[in-house]
Amino acid sequence: MTTPPDELSATARAVLGAGLGCLAGAFVLPLVVFVAVIIANRLNPVCGTPADSGGCEMGLVSSTITAIVPGVLIGIAVGIALGLRNSRQKPRS
């Protein structure tokens, strides 16, 4: 039986970064979009009036849900890039 290597390969670091980036992006971007739309709704004088008919709330929900897929894709790309960059750096001794 062999012992596992101490250092991860560049591919392993990229895959690990993609997985972690995927999870982070799936939460961070929708949260940012949610807060931005809430701020925009607070600045819109029509939101909350009877003329709105729930449009501002529907926009809040739909934009937050729609932001999940781009968040995942951006997170994967950033995770791969950071994983590859970290694997190419020389270890500090």
Image (tube, grey):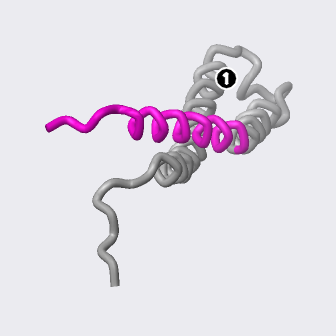
Q: Quadrant of the N terminus?
A: bottom left
Q: Position of residue 8 (x, y in %)?
A: 39, 54
Q: Residues within 10 Å of mark 1 (few under 14, many from 20)?
A: some
Examine the rendered structure and indicate whether residue 52 appears above or below residue 22.
above
Q: Position of residue 87 (x, y in %)?
A: 40, 40
Residue at 67% from the left image edge and 23% from the top image edge:
41
Q: State the residue position of label 1.
A: 41
Residue at 63% from the left image edge and 35% from the top image edge:
74
Examine the rendered structure and indicate whether residue 48 appears above or below residue 40.
below
Q: Position of residue 63 (x, y in %)?
A: 74, 35
Residue at 71% from the left image edge and 28% from the top image edge:
48
Residue nearest the observer in this picture, 68 or 20: 20
| Residue type, numbered disc 1 | Asn
Residue at 76% from the left image edge and 18% from the top image edge:
46
Outermost residue toward the left in this view: 93
Which segment did they paint magenta? 69-93
Residue nearest the observer in this picture, 86 or 1: 1
Left-right relation of 21 to 55: left
Residue nearest the observer in this picture, 92 or 62: 92
Left-right relation of 66 to 92: right
Q: Position of residue 80 (x, y in %)?
A: 55, 40
Q: Quadrant of the C terminus?
A: top left
Left-right relation of 27 to 60: left
Outermost residue toward the front in this view: 2
Can residue 75 be found in the magenta stretch? yes
Which structural element holds mark 1?
helix
Residue nearest the observer in this picture, 5 or 23: 5
